[in-house]
Amino acid sequence: MSIENTHRPVRPFYWSVRRELWEHHSLSLAPLIVAAVALIGMLISVVMSLAKSLAKVATMEPVEQTSLLSAPYSAVALLVMITSVIVGCFYCLDALHGERRDRSILFWKSLPVSDATTVLAKASIPMLVLPLIAFMIITVVQLITVFVSTVVVLAHGISVATLWSKLPFMQMPIGVFYFLVATALWYAPVYAWLLFISAWAKRGTFIWAVVPPMALIAFVQLVGIAPNVGKNIRSQLIGSAELGFSVTANGEMIPDPMKFLSSPEVWIGLLIAAGLLLATVRLRRRREPF
Amino acid sequence: MSVTTPVIAARGLTKAFNKHIAVNGIDLNIESGRIVGLVGPNGAGKTTALNSILGLTPFQGELKVLGRDPWIERDLLMRDVCFIADVAVLPRWMRVSQALDYVEGVHQRFNRTQAEGFLAKTTIKHNSKVAELSKGMVTQLHLALVMAIDAKLLVLDEPTLGLDILFQKQFYESLIHDYYDKDRTIIVATHHIDEIAHVLTDVIFVDGGRIVLSCSTDDFESHFFELSVRGEDIAAARELNPIHERHTFGRSVFLFRDVDPEKLAALGEVRTPSLSDVFVAVITNQPSAVKGAA
């Protein structure tokens, strides 16, 4: 009889996520590079022209002041987010294809990790890990910018209050966080579709991922069910911004979780995502290298 | 686990791909503590049979591995079963230290200290990537990972394919010396039988998706004989229904199955044949499939 091992806790999900990060350095690297470039740009503009803008701001309406001063912060957040969505899409398209291509699926399957754990760990990369990485990067970049701005303002002998009162400090991290969560939920069916294709297709994952939706759109357009396809695609892409926020009378976008969560589109999307992930788990079970 | 509970029990195990039948109604009973050689030509159905056993492919028929249905419960089964599919399956981007971290993180029965001990005997460095290792080193790494898992069944499918003879020898030596014990079962699929003949307790020959011979290596010696004959005795030897005949240097070498060795000794020199000679004889005698001798 073999000696029963002391039951050391094992964490298959945690380590499955860790291993994805080991394999795909670009998951954190790409948003970091974009953020670094954006940060350099912001710092140059702060040093060169912040003092001038602040002088000009004095003559503006309060709303205009805030939007002028906080615009660069939103721009950086948006850039990093778009990057991480793109990285997430490419990651998904390769996630279950690469392991068959390099035959490593036989190694992963030789360990006591279920197909459901594997697929959920891979799905959590674009839906959980990437938004978290993006949030941290955005927050750090914004904090650095605030710090440098403060130094520049002080150096010019202008009151710091003029700057600080115009920056929506609290709203910034909360707004970014909310937008990231909403975007992850909004894009869930896209990520799930790409994961499904990566488990299903033998080759040409990109073609398979793109052509059927395109064909469907073309069909819908020709039949005339939904004539305004261009507008529909646009609202698909920015759905989390459109449905997740309300625009106030003075043109400010404020988070509106109630509006977002009561939109049927969000729930239909999540349902589709769940169905696709279930199908992906089943597919992965019968997948072998090719 | 008691000795009588089979590690693998299959009844009519069948696997068909479209019209091609890769595994055709195999019955199998493998008990704990055996080292089984699964031998067959390319396309005989070895890998397909093993894939069914490992839960990598759905199948028809009855199959229980350690009492579980492998297709339904692969992840649970892998707590007690290890396999090395072939030398190329470790992910190339992975570092040796990451492989240790990962297996330790997901496998309850993995003993990291032991794995590091095995690795210390090799020239593999912990910060190397799999891509930087030679084929032989990758196999050593995989074997170190697998041998540090306290499993009940180890399945190896052509584990030394493409390795030089030195690594081949080392591979089986460390497997037998550092890993094998009475509570463990090892199945090795290969078409290089003589390379592993000395360590096996059982052999199973497969061809065309069927088992054509299944016996223990002890039984093997009492069932198969090789007779080397000269001149007029050749005709007499043929009378005794040899299963195979070949000619070398003016001699005829006959292979007999279940023939009284006393009778054979009267005609010439009797020896125990090599596994590969019997394999060739049995396979070329197909499709008149020989029933299991064990």
Image (spheres, helix red, strand yellow):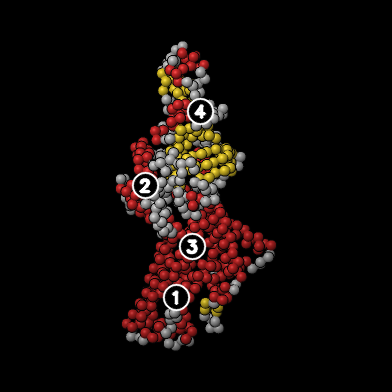
The answer to whether dots 1 and 4 both sit on one chain is: no
Circle 2: element type = helix
Q: Which residue is mark 4?
A: B282
Name the chain letter of the residue that bears numbered label 1. A
For this rendering, which residue is in front, A20 or B257?
B257
Label 3 is placed on what type of residue? Ser
Name the chain letter of the residue that bears numbered label 4. B
For this rendering, which residue is in front, A138 or A3?
A3
Spatial separation of the CA atoms under disc 1 and disc 3: 22 Å
x 41%, y 46%: residue: A1
Residue B277 seen in the current view: no
Spatial separation of the CA atoms under disc 3 and disc 4: 54 Å
Callout 4 crowding tier (Cα within 10 Å): few <14, some 14–19, many ≥20 = many
The answer to whether dots 3 and 2 both sit on one chain is: no
Name the disc covering residue A173, or none: 1
The picture quadrant where one finds residue B209 is: top right
Circle 1: element type = helix
Q: Nearer the viewer, mark 3 or mark 2?
A: 2
Is there a contact, CB below 8 Å, between mark 3 and mark 4?
A: no
Q: Which residue is mark 3?
A: A124
Spatial separation of the CA atoms under disc 1 and disc 4: 75 Å
Callout 2 crowding tier (Cα within 10 Å): few <14, some 14–19, many ≥20 = many
x 61%, y 40%: residue: B19
Q: Residue furthest top?
A: B232
**Percent coordinates x, y for residue A3 in the rendering:** 39, 49
Q: Which residue is mark 2?
A: B144
Is there a contact, CB below 8 Å, between mark 1 and mark 2?
A: no
How many numbered discs, if any? 4
Label 1 is placed on what type of residue? Pro
Circle 3: element type = helix
Judge whether A233 appears above or below B183 on screen. below
Judge whether A275 appears above or below B214 on screen. below
